[in-house]
Image (tube, rainbow, N blue to C red):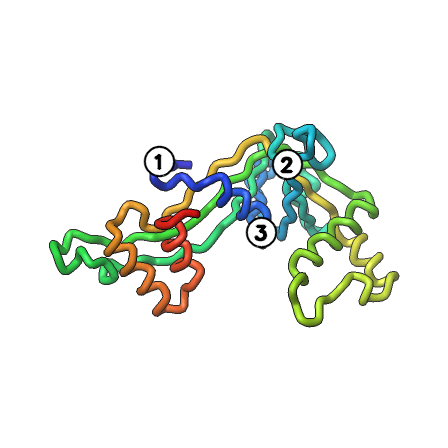
Amino acid sequence: MYIPAHFAPSPATVRDLLAHPGAANLVTMTDAGLLATLVPFVYEPPGPDGGAGTDAGDGYGSLQGHLARNNPQWSYAPAGEALVIIQGPDAYISPSWYASKAEHGRVVPTWNYTTVHVYGRLVVHEDPAWLACHVRRLTGLHEDGREHPWSVDDAPAPFIGGQLRAIVGVELLITRIEAKEKHSQNRSDDDARGVAAGLCAEGLGASAAAVERVRHPR
């Protein structure tokens, strides 16, 4: 990934994206060519010994998700590294939002975004106990804070058992991470304020907040 120094995110931003990734694209190179699936993930941080998941990895932890058993991607052994692409807020940036447009007009459109490329070795899990623990963690992550959170135990056990048999677990043991956060850091304060205001006016609050956050890091 091309990462100019002024677009390199802080370690805290990367950790936050890993901890709250939502769904991300799992990409593997196989004998059948490149395969990709959008998968919800849970981040398992490195333990005290630097390891995580089923192996020690390189001390970055792991991303744990699952695929439908009928999805052929899991059954192909990855050729080399696997990749998970995590996306943060992104948005089109209109030149009309820049204060400098009125000053000299030398402005063009661009795109603001946050992205993390997570590389590692992919491990497949078919153990029912691993899968049951995984779906409980994943569900709890996204149900937390809801007025009436749903629990796996709300469904009949035989039904849940059947659902678990229809999936396989995938775990990316992370070996390296590349991240980029482009939110108008290369613009003047006046231009950045214009971008934030324009994004807010279009209902893109997360992207507007990202512009403000990178200008005023904690």
| Distance between mark 2 and mark 3 Cα atoms | 14 Å
Q: 202 or 9, which is in the foreground?
A: 9
* Cβ atoms at labels 2 and 1 below 8 Å apart: no
Left or right of 64? Residue 12 is left
Residue 75 pos. (x, y %): 70, 41
| Residue at image location 35% in from the left, 49% down from the top | 215
Q: Which residue is mark 1?
A: 5
Dot placed on the residue nearer the N-terminal end, 2 or 1: 1
109 lies above or below 151: above
Residue 104 pos. (x, y %): 11, 54
Q: 43 or 69, which is in the foreground?
A: 43
Residue 151 pos. (x, y %): 76, 63
| Distance between mark 1 and mark 3 Cα atoms | 24 Å
Q: Which mark is residue 20?
A: 3
Residue 23 pos. (x, y %): 58, 53
Amino acid residing under circle 3: His
Q: Quadrant of residue 53?
A: top right
